[in-house]
Image (tube, helix red, strand yellow):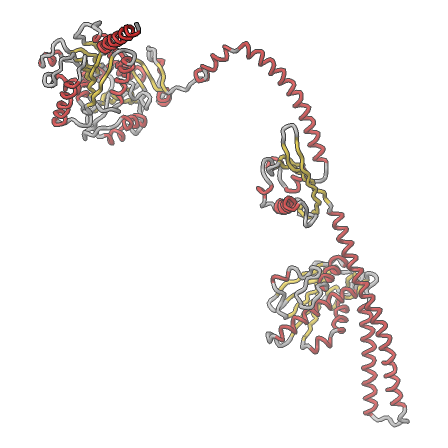
Amino acid sequence: MKRILFIFAVILFTQTSFLYAKSVKNILILNSYHKGFEWSDKLIDGMEKLFYKSNIDTTILYMDSKRISSKDYFDKLKELYQLQLTKHKYDLVVAIDKFAYAFILQNYKELNIKQPIYFLGIEQFFEEEVKEYGLEGKVSGMMERRAIEENIDIIKTLMPTIKKLYILNDQSANGDDSEIFIKNAIKKVSEKIEIEYIRKIRFEDLIEKFSIYKKDEALFFVRFYNDSTGKLYQNYEIASFIQNAKIPVFVTDDLFIKKGALGGKLVDIKQLGINSAMRIKGILQKQVNTPKIEVDNSYKYVFDYGKVKEFNINLSRLDKNFTYVNAPISFFERNREFINFVFVIAPFLLFLILGLMHNLYLRIKSAKKLKQRMQFDKVLLNSINSPIIWEDDKGYIVDSNSKFNELLNMSCEEMQGKRLRDFVENQNVSNLFKLLKTFINKNAFDENELVLKSRDDTEHIYMINKTDYTENIYKTSGTVVVFTDVTKEKLALREKIKHQEFIIQQSKLAEIGEIFSSIAHQWKTPLLEITTIAQEQIYSCEGKIDEENNAFVNDIMVQVKYMAETISDFQNFIMPSANKVSFDIYEAVSKMLEIMKHNIKYNYIKVNVNVKPNTNLIIYGYKNELMQTLLNIVNNAKDAIIKRRKQNKIKQGIINIDIKNLDNKVLIEIEDNGGGIPKEHINNVFEAYYTTKQNGHGIGLYMAKLIIEDKMDGKINVENTKNGAKFIIKLGVNDENIIARR
C-alpha cells in the first residue's frame, strides 16, 4: 500500500512539473542600448514589474548601439544572436527602440526567428517596411509618441509674453523620427513667436548658449545624447546642463523632470513599459488579436516646484490637472503614519494628557516654590561679602555670587559652564588656580593666604575654605569654595611684626649705646689724665717754656679733644630716637659722613654732597635711625668700590649724594661707581635676610626700607646706573619749620 502511494505521488509531481514547465512563457528582449542607459532601464523595469507576478520569463540582450554602431559590430552581434536563438526557444522576441527593431527586421531570416515580434519605444511605424522583409502578420508593437505640439501650446500658455523658443533635438535616428512632428508644430507657431531649431551643436557651446538669463525665452528639450562631434553624453551630464540653464527648460518625458527640467506633458516611461508588458501578456495568452499596432497614451502633467518658483511661472493658467515634484513636504505628509497612529490611540492619549496636565500643574507649583527658594538663596549669597564659587565634580563652574564676579571682573554668564583654567589670562584666576591646584594635590596649603586684586587694582588677602558637597536628588557632587577677606587683619599683623622688628632694632641699638656709653666713660678718664699730664709738663718747666714743647702739648690737647667729641658723637649716633623730631637732613648727612670720614679717606673714596639751591631740608622723623640707614647705604657703596678697585676696574671711588626737592618731597640720591647690583639680585635686596655678601646678615637694607617707608612714610628704591648703583629716598618735608639751603 505504501509503495502504491509513493508511485502515485511521484507521477503526480512529474505531471505537475511538466504542466508548469509547459505553462512558462519565455521572451527574448533585445535592447538597443547598454545596461545603465536610463530610458531603456526604466522601460524594462516597468515591464519586469508586471512579469514578476506572472509566468513570463525574460532574457535581455544589450546591443549598446549608442556607443558602437559599425557594420562589423552588428555582424558580430548577428552571430551571437544566432547562437542564442539556436540554444534557447522563445515564445516572443521584443525589440526596444529603433535600432533593435531595425536589426530584427533586417536579420529575421538569417537569425531563423519563428516567433512573433513586438516592438516598443519607436515613434513611427511603416507597414511597407514590414512587407519589404516579408513579415506581414508577425509584427505588433506600441509606439511612444512625444507630445510635441501639446508641449509647445503649454509653453505659450504658461509664458504668454514669450518672444523666442529654442527646440533642441539631436542627430540620432530617433531624432530623425521626431523631426517630422517638430517641423509640423513649428509651422503652426512660427508666425507668432520666433523659433530656433537646434540639431547640430557642440555640447560646450550648448552650455554656454543657455548660461545667461534672457527674458521671455524658453528651451523645449526633445532629446540630446550626441552632439555635432558625435560624442555620446551621459544622463548626468545632460541633467547638469538642464539644471544650470538660465531659462525655463520644458521636456517631453519624465527622464529629467527631477533633474532640473521645469516640466510639461510627459511620457511616463515606466508606465509605457507596464502597458507594453500587459499587451505582451495578452498576446502570449492569445487574448489579443495580432498583429496589433497602437500608440501609448501614458501622459502626465508634471512640473518642478523649485523651477516654477525660480522663473515665476503661473500654473493656474494651465487648465489641466498636474502634479509637482521636488515640492516641500507638508507636516501632515511627513508624519502621515504618526498622525494615523495618534487617531487610533486618541482616547488613551486624552487620559494621558489629563494626567500629564495635572502632573504639570504640580510641577509648575513646585517649580515656583523652587524658583522662589533659588532667588532667596541667590539674594542671600550675594549679600555675603565673601566671594563664593561652586563647581561640579568635573571642575565646571555651576554658579557664583556677585562678590566672586567682582573679584574676577567677569559676569556669571561668562563663567557658567566653563572651567577656571579657561580664564588663565586673568591674573586673579591664574593665582587662584595655582592655589586650588595645591589644595587638591596636597589637601593643604603651603601658604594659607591668597593675594588677589580688585577692580580698583587694590590688593586683597583671602583665606580659602574648600568643602565638597553631594546632592542626593540628581546624584550630583562638586566643591564649594569660600573666600574670606582677611586683608585688614593680615595688614595689621604685618604692621605689628614690622613695629616689633623696629622696636627690637631700637632695643639692640639701645643696648649697644649703653655698652658704648660705659666704654666712653672709661675712655674719658684716661683722656682727662693725658690732658692733665700734658699741662703739668708745661707748668713744671718753671717758666722755661720753649716753643717746641708748647706746640707738642697743644697737639696733644687738640687730639684729646677730638677723641672726646668723637666718642660723644658715636654715643649720640648709636642711641635710638625716642620720638619723631624735625631735623635738617643736610646736617644728618654731614654727621653721618663725619663718623666714617677716616674709613672713607683711607680707602681713596671721594664723597660729594650736592644740595640744590632753595631746597627745603627740614623733615620730620627718627633722626638717628635715618642716619643709620644712610650709613648702611654709604657703607655698602664703600664695600663695592673697594672690591672693584681690587679688581683694577677703577682707580678712585666716588660717592655722590644729591639733595633736592621734588613735588613737595625731599629727594636724596646716593650714587656710587662700584659696578652696581647684579640683575638677578636687584629686586630682592630689600627683603629680610637676603644678602649678596659672603658674611652679610641681610638685615641692613630690610631695616632701611622699614624705617623709611613704614616709620617715616617715605619711599626707597634702587636702580643701576652706568657706573654703579643709585639709591633714591623720598621723604616728606616739614613745612612748619622751613630752612632752605641757598
Q: Is residue 585 visible?
A: yes
Q: Is residue 569 above or below residue 165?
A: below
Q: In the rendered picture of this protein, how many numbered marks are placed on residues?
A: 0
Q: Is residue 544 above or below residue 593?
A: below
- Choose between 220 and 326: the one closer to the eye: 326
93 vs 523, left or right, is: left
Residue 380, picture quadrant: top right
442 vs 312, left or right, is: right
- Choose between 139 and 408: the one closer to the eye: 139
Q: What residue lies at 61% left-to-right and 66% top-to-bottom?
A: 721
Residue 167, picture quadrant: top left
Quadrant (top left/top right/bottom left/bottom right) for the N terminus: top left
- Give the percent coordinates (x, y) of residue 153: 27, 14
Quadrant (top left/top right/bottom left/bottom right) for the C terminus: bottom right
122 vs 312, left or right, is: left
Q: Is residue 123 visible?
A: no
- Give the percent coordinates (x, y) of residue 543: 90, 93
Q: What residue lies at 60% left-to-right and 41% top-to-bottom?
A: 420
Residue 693, picture quadrant: bottom right
Q: What residue lies at 85% left-to-right and 71% top-to-bottom?
A: 517
Q: Is residue 697 above or below residue 530?
A: above
Q: What residue lies at 83% left-to-right and 80% top-to-bottom?
A: 561
- Give the percent coordinates (x, y) of residue 338: 47, 15
- Give the percent coordinates (x, y) of residue 488: 75, 47
